[in-house]
Image: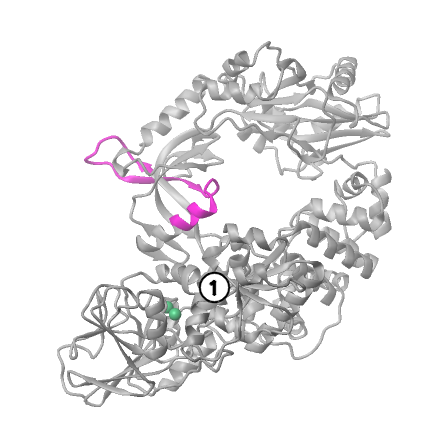
Amino acid sequence: MHSIRRHPLLEFNSNGIYCAQADVYIDPWRKVDRALITHAHADHARYGMKHYLTTSGSALIMRERIGQSLSIETTKYGQKHTIGGVTFSFHPAGHVLGSAMIRVEHKGEVWVASGDYKIGHDSFGNHFEPIPCHTFITESTFGLPVFRWKEESEVFDEINTWWKKNQSMGYTSIVYAYSLGKAQRVLQGIDPSIGPVVCHSAVQKLNQAIYSAGYSIHSSNSFTEWKEGPKDTLPLVIAPPASADGPWMKNHKPYVTAIASGWMALRGNRRRRNVDRGFVLSDHADWNGLLFAIEQSQANQVLVTHGYSQLFSQYLIEQGWYAHVAETAFSDGFHEVEENQVTE
Amino acid sequence: MKDFSALVRKVDQTTKTSLRREALVQYFSACSDSDKVWCIALFTKNTRKRPMPSQRLREIASDIVNLPPWLIDESKSIVGDTAETLALLLPEPTERSYKTLSEWMVWLESLKALKEEPERQEHAIKEAWRGLNAEERFVFNKLITGGFRLGIATRTVIKALARYQECEESQIALALSGQWDPMQLTFEELMARGQGSDLSIPYPFYLAYPLHTGPKANDEDQQKALKDLGAIADYQIEWKWDGIRGQLIHRKDKVFLWSRGSELISDSFPDLISAGESFNQDVVLDGEIVAYMDTIEPFEQLQRRLGRKQPSKNMMNKVPVRFIAYDILEINGQDLRKEPLKARRNYLEQFINQHQLEKVMISDTIKVNTWSHLVGLHKQSRQYKAEGFMIKSIESTYREGRKRGDWWKWKVNPMTVDAVLLYANRGSGRRANLYSDYTFAVWSSDDKKTRTLLPFAKAYSGLTDKEITEVDKFVKKNTKERFGPVRSVIPKLVMEIGFEDIRKSTRHKSGFAVRFPRIMRWRKDKPLDEIDSMNRLQHLLDDKQDGG
Ligand SMILES: [Zn+2]
Ligand SMILES: [Zn+2]
């Protein structure tokens, strides 16, 4: 048995995931003094914390997106930080560049806050490492059995074929992909010999920052570079979903459009977004991936957040897990929408 | 099935009509004639009887996928469609099935025949699933659960066939209209219908386009919209009656009655058929079937006759019907649709005058000299038992489908009520992930101390996609309770709800039933405190009965 504490090692309060023992928050949504950040997506890394602790990969992106002047202490995967007698370490979550699951240990009790994660290795080089723990806080963005991902290489084959076919019919191919994570994965995954890749400024800016920090990443053109360069083959344009229907698209007529997202597994989602194609490519674990991670954690308690938390935890309970929903500031429904529109 | 599911994928993977048409032409060029007939039927005909309820199909799948039934049901409510949900859940095929589309359709008939033997049905379905990949399973499941609509317009199919057959689109449209059974017809026979091989065949209906005078149009707005049409003398104006649109056909002593949905309804209206039998000329009339005592009766009366085959004498006496002819499309075998409306009107008047039948009347034209007179008269529509006007250019030919340009319908403003959102339900299909079906409530009375909220109408259409997303967000943040796919929400969101008609109803909690409710606009300006009460509904009902 563990020693008796007034608070659980991690708890959900109105500011975020709180560790009372160390007086720090993980992925807080309100302004706090000390924030540990799992990854740089906007729903996890927010503006306004006095001090941040995160991986160097996440720090790179956060400086680019939130501000250069942030007070960030950076860490490496596996490095230990002791705060108020609690040991924190960051471990690869396979979600996006720099993403981590945060391991929290105090007097032999281990909790893991997963943030967002994805199983396996991806084209960008992200990978997932399971961490044994007593309590596992899992996301459940795609926590329904209808979500089952294909091998990444199969999806890139589909994109390559589509791009070539569009070229032969005289169309530019526009792929909407979230600018942090998905965009770079697409850039790394497609076959660059088919033609030039052009990136929307929001994507290109990140690509350059990532490249300058020494990560290996295929080269891509900004709109201006492309405009001035030779145009013998029709490009693949990578743009964030929010830029859809923007004036920049005029320059690429005639074009066909696609979205790369896990949500594209459902026809209704694709039709609602009115794109031609949906490529099922996600930075989150699918149903089997979530179950695998939980299995691997060997946890005796599972807290479910971020997605279909109610349904998923109910299923876990029926399977014999001690699981429940961890209420975050937003109802799970809000995350459904937010993930759909923002991070996927 | 492989080719057909590839076609379904292709039309599904593009938003461009031209590419969809292209895919269809390609499919027609490669597939067998019997597959063509089924493909056309599936894309253009209304829902066929489903061989199996979707609930049952989910149960059968639950056994294979090793998931609790509640989770499959929840998944379905999020995906929005059983066929798609199961296609996603089922395991990869372990064998390969080579049945063609038409072979599967015959197989489905045999499945229906096993109705009394659920175990054999279950066995057959499991076996079928084992031989189909995810894409084919989706199509297969769709065939079983019925409702095979994949957002492809009949127009597109007609265009593709016309290209493939190298003939006029109108000929194809004719070939596909009316009733035909893909089980009975070869492709050749189907196409021959376009050249008059089938006496019963109706023409595709020409539908008027709504005249937009703005959601809260005043007299001036309305006059402006009308003036934009040009000179009133160039139009034929008629009342728009509240019945069902139909075609009454007399050819070679055979009589047929069709509804707008291409449904043969002769059996429901023997009284109109016998009127048609007394015609001494071959003719095709387009008109409105209405319930009629001394005057036109409300639609609810007609409803008692609809869908009832071989009505009793008693029923026919209680709810007599009439056919009010709007137009004449064919006389003595001659297609009149290319003639201008003014010429068709002459033929129609002649025909009706010659016959002098009680049951087949002509739709009177309204003679007013100015648009402003018409605005005045429009307000009295309900007194005349009409829903508003049809305004048709006298030069117009009789076209196919709903076209903009020469036929307009100008309906009376629907009755409106300000109400609050009480429950939200996930939508289906395209809106599967969104709370897009709503139940609205009004106050039970005007007494602020004792009043409660009473649900009175369900409405979904009328909001833009952007607004739906906004409401969806609201619902998810303001949920009070969840019951399966339904959430009750904190009553805050006020909308103006419009409807076509209101009547007393004992089946509804509120005591009123409204017809065609829809959202007119979002009243962000209006607090909950000020929404309407039951008194407003009562007032609308009284108002209607006064005819004012
Ligand atoms: Zn994320
Ligand atoms: Zn997230």
Residue sitting nearer the eye, B339 or B437: B339
User: How many numbered marks, from 0 up?
Assistant: 1
Residue sitting nearer the eye, A44 or B280: A44
Q: Position of residue B121 (x, y in %)?
A: 64, 67
Q: Is ligand 2 less than 8 Å from the beta carbon at label 1?
A: no
Q: Is residue B454 above or below residue A322?
A: above
Residue B524 belongs to the span the image colors magenta: no
Q: Secondary structure at mark 1?
A: helix
Residue at x 37% of width, y 29% of height: B537
Give the residue number, with chain letter if any, for mark 1: B73
Q: Is residue A94 visible?
A: yes
Write the start and end of the magenta stretch as one range: B442-471
**Left/right of residue B373 with respect to residue A9 in the rendered view:** right
Residue at x 59% of width, y 55% of height: A252
Residue at x 83% of width, y 52% of height: B187
Quarter the C terminus of chain A occupies: bottom left
**Left/right of residue A32 with respect to residue B208 in the rendered view:** left
Res. B248 image quadrant: top right
Q: Is residue A145 visible?
A: no
Residue B449 belongs to the span the image colors magenta: yes
Q: Is residue B466 above or below residue B311?
A: below
Residue sitting nearer the eye, B36 or B52: B36
